[in-house]
Amino acid sequence: MSSENISQSLKLFIVLSRAYRSINEQVNKRIQTYGLNPTEFAVLELLYHKGDQPLQQIGGKILLASGSITYVVDKLEQKDYLRRVACPNDRRVTFAQITEKGKEFIENIFPEHEQKIHEIMSVLSEEEKESAIELIKRVGLSVGKY
């Protein structure tokens, strides 16, 4: 490996990191205008799109430490956006379930959320987006964490 190759790898890492941070900051600012923090939004969006989820598995699906899930679920429950439901087959398992109020809330804000993400990504053509998806996925899969 030449020092030029190593330098290029470091540059790519820095560019990816800065791009992710910039995009995330923009999206998170938008989410906060809805009265949610990004983690609350992620949990609500997960429940809306994927259905009931065991509390123990939510953290892994939205990349959050499991200790924080209880706090986030409590806050969403206080807002009446989700409820806890005991698993009928296993008393050790509790599911988070989106409420009607939570569904209505997500249905009202999600179109604007996805439009904002589309606007951010619109600097790329459809072909460039496809290439970026494949290339970034390949890097992620190579380290087994994607």
Image (cartoon, rainbow, N blue to C red):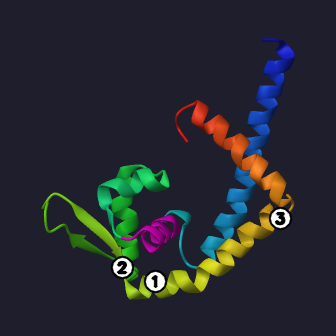
Please name the amino acid that badge 3 sits on.
Answer: Ser
Please name the amino acid that badge 2 sits on.
Answer: Gln
Rendered image: mark on residue 122: 3
**Neighbourhood count class around disc 3 (C-alpha, 10 Å): few under 14, some 14–19, many 20 upward:** few
Q: Is residue 57 depicted above or below 26 in this figure? A: above
The picture quadrant where one finds residue 89 is bottom left
Q: Are marks 1 and 3 in contact (CB under 8 Å)?
A: no
Task: Say which of 55 and 73 sits in front.
Answer: 55
The picture quadrant where one finds residue 71 is bottom left
Instruction: Kindly identify the residue that appears in the image at 83 percent across and 26 percent down.
Output: 8
Instruction: Kindly identify the residue that appears in the image at 72 percent across and 64 percent down.
Output: 26
Instruction: Kindly identify the residue that appears in the image at 77 percent across and 28 percent down.
Output: 10
- The percent coordinates of residue 65 (x first, y second) are 42, 49
Per the model, the C-alpha gap separating discs 1 and 2 is 15 Å
Give the extent of the magenta segment.
40-51
Name the secondary structure under disc 1: helix
Name the secondary structure under disc 2: helix
Q: Quadrant of the C terminus?
A: top right
Spot the residue most to the top.
1
Q: Quadrant of the N terminus?
A: top right
Please name the amino acid that badge 1 sits on.
Answer: Lys
User: Mark 1 vs mark 3: which is more N-terminal?
Assistant: 1
Rendered image: mark on residue 78: 2
User: Mark 2 vs mark 3: which is more N-terminal?
Assistant: 2
Instruction: Kindly identify the residue that appears in the image at 41 percent across and 54 percent down.
Output: 59
- The percent coordinates of residue 109 (x first, y second) are 60, 81
Per the model, the C-alpha gap separating discs 2 and 3 is 37 Å
Residue 3 on the magenta span: no
- The percent coordinates of residue 60 (x first, y second) are 42, 50
Residue 48 on the magenta span: yes
